[in-house]
Amino acid sequence: MHIVTRHSGCTCVIWLGSDRPRAIGVAHWAGPHAQVAARNPAFHEYRQHLFVEGASAIGPEIAGIATSIPPGGGADGIAEAILAPRLLPLDAGLRHLGRCGDPDAFGCTHVHLATGGSTRHRGPEDRTRIGARCVLLIRRRPGAGRRDFARAVHEVLAGALAGAEGVHEVRSQVYRSWSDTTGDASRVAPDGSREPRDDAGLVLGVGTADDLASALARMTAVAEPLRASCSAILAYPVARTLLYRRDGRPTLAQVKPERRPQLDPARRRLPPPPARAATRSGATPFPPHRLIPTGGPGAEDVVADRAGRLVYGVRDGRILRLDPATGRESVIGHSGGRPLGLEIVDDDVLLVCDARRGLLRMQVATGAVEPLVEHLHDVPLRFCSNATAARDGTIWFTQSSERFDLEHHVGALLEHRGTGRLLRRSPEGDVAILLDGLDFANGLTLDDDEASLIFAETGSHRIRRLWVRGPRQGAVETLADNLPGFPDNLSRMRDGRFWVALAAPRNALLDRLGSSPAWIRKLLWRLPEDVSPKPEHTAWAMQFDRAGRVLADLQQDVPGFAFATGVAEADGVLYLAPAEGTHLLALDLDAGQLSRSAE
């Protein structure tokens, strides 16, 4: 049984400009235009459906109803929105859908309002299972009553499609009289009239292309009641759907400083921190050390290649390589966003987790960048944190939070909702969510035999293991719990040992806030950043074995260095990278007589 929910919404049908390559208009629509729409408070949800270029309508032929797209008359996509329940602006908020900063990006747009429950969703929807979509644009037959037309769309058509095998989404809208048209409005409509305005729309999401064909074929069974009210039903195949605003929040990473998003705190209670959290030095003597300047601030992570050269990404998007022996630094490439975690694959390929662009693959020799995972279930992948790769090409990577981006990461630690994820990309490119609800998922590494994956949950002060192969596949266990600091990135495991960078000691206030009333954390979140509580400055790394036993605990306050978020070992030297600052910290492990686990 399908549950029907009613909303107020709107749709904008878009024809891209014809005097430039289509890809340029698509990039503007999905880029600068989407950035503005995603932050529009008028929208509770906003998404874009890009149609397959030059595709013919894929619906069945129905006598008396136009189902073919006229030459040159096909739309390029639609923007679909659910309006926020508290306000309903009929001017600037909606009109933006059909306008953009680039006057040549859109050739023609039509914005239609669907208020008073005339936007209907048949649920439950399951976006994770949708592999194909189409959008039906529908015109009312002249002389047909509005109520009869609405019934034909919402009940007859949507009901027939919802009952098909493999259908996971049916959203229908019947438009009100308000509309806004820009650009060339002289295009020919599918029923032969000179007025191109549509009267209704329907989004259909299914599992496979075969499911889509069989679902649309059901329209012929209800042809008679549809023919009485509809003069045209055009089914456009969708090439891509992107969800840019969800639950009143943008899903896009910020591109310039903006207001903090609202906090929705959950309660949790942590065990008392260990006694080690109250001290400022570890049990292992801190070895001789030195600062190494970098060519930019914010080297969030650091890795070492087989030649012992260090690779790190800085705040402006550059990926840099440093030879510690000579001090020579060079630019490998630019991620196009904000690089966080890195992983070297055979010295020729670099995996980059970019907080704004997702999971990327960079060729070390040329700096060429290939996006591997930019979106997941229609949502842009923001705050991609760290990655590790197996010998067969499988990539595991973390997303620290679905709700917060990098610039507002403290919100995830205050909220305690566990919105981090652990994901896997197969060698064929398929992406799966292995674990959800993680408390700020962060660094990760494979065990030497690649049978298990070890990862950090920064917000819960723990390190966990997921078995990915063998008889225990799928089992999760805690490797090290109630750590004295915030674990961040991990080094790659070698010989059963790995290093963990601890960004800061445990914060007693933050521990207590987890069980405090929501209003206290909301108030703290509203404080200006310069008066908010700050983490303590320290340089800290711990080494563990594969059973979770501590092998080394190195901590010391080092002037000019703070917030160790990345760690790598090479040639008897341990390198720490800071989220802030312009220097790496090099610790001479050989001089300190510590065991080596070459990176």
Image (spheres, rainbow, N blue to C red):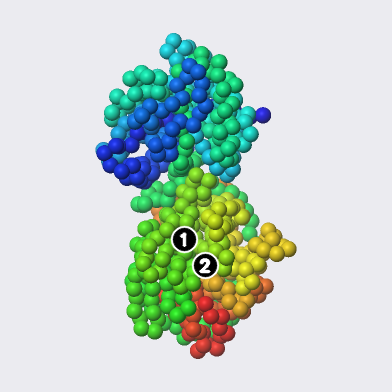
Mark on residue 489?
2
- Residue type of the residue flagged with mark 1: Cys
- Residue type of the residue flagged with mark 2: Asn
Q: Is residue 20 visible?
A: yes
Residue 259: give x, y in percent of width and height. Answer: 39, 48
Give the mark nearer the N terminus: 1 vs 2.
1
Q: Nearer the viewer, mark 1 or mark 2?
A: 1
Secondary structure beneath label 2: strand
Residue 295: give x, y in percent of width and height. Answer: 33, 71
Q: Is residue 122 above or below residue 315?
A: above
Front residue of 487/72: it is 72
To which residue does mark 1 refer? 353
Answer left or right for 528 relative to 157: left
Q: Residue at x 28, y 42 (%)?
A: 20
Q: Residue at x 63, y 76 (%)?
A: 496
Mark 2 crowdedness (10 Å alpha carbons): few <14, some 14-19, many ≥20: many
- The residue lying furthest to the top in this view is 143
Q: Is residue 86 visible?
A: no
Q: Residue at x 38, y 27 (%)?
A: 70
Residue 291: give x, y in percent of width and height. Answer: 40, 79
Front residue of 505/228: it is 228
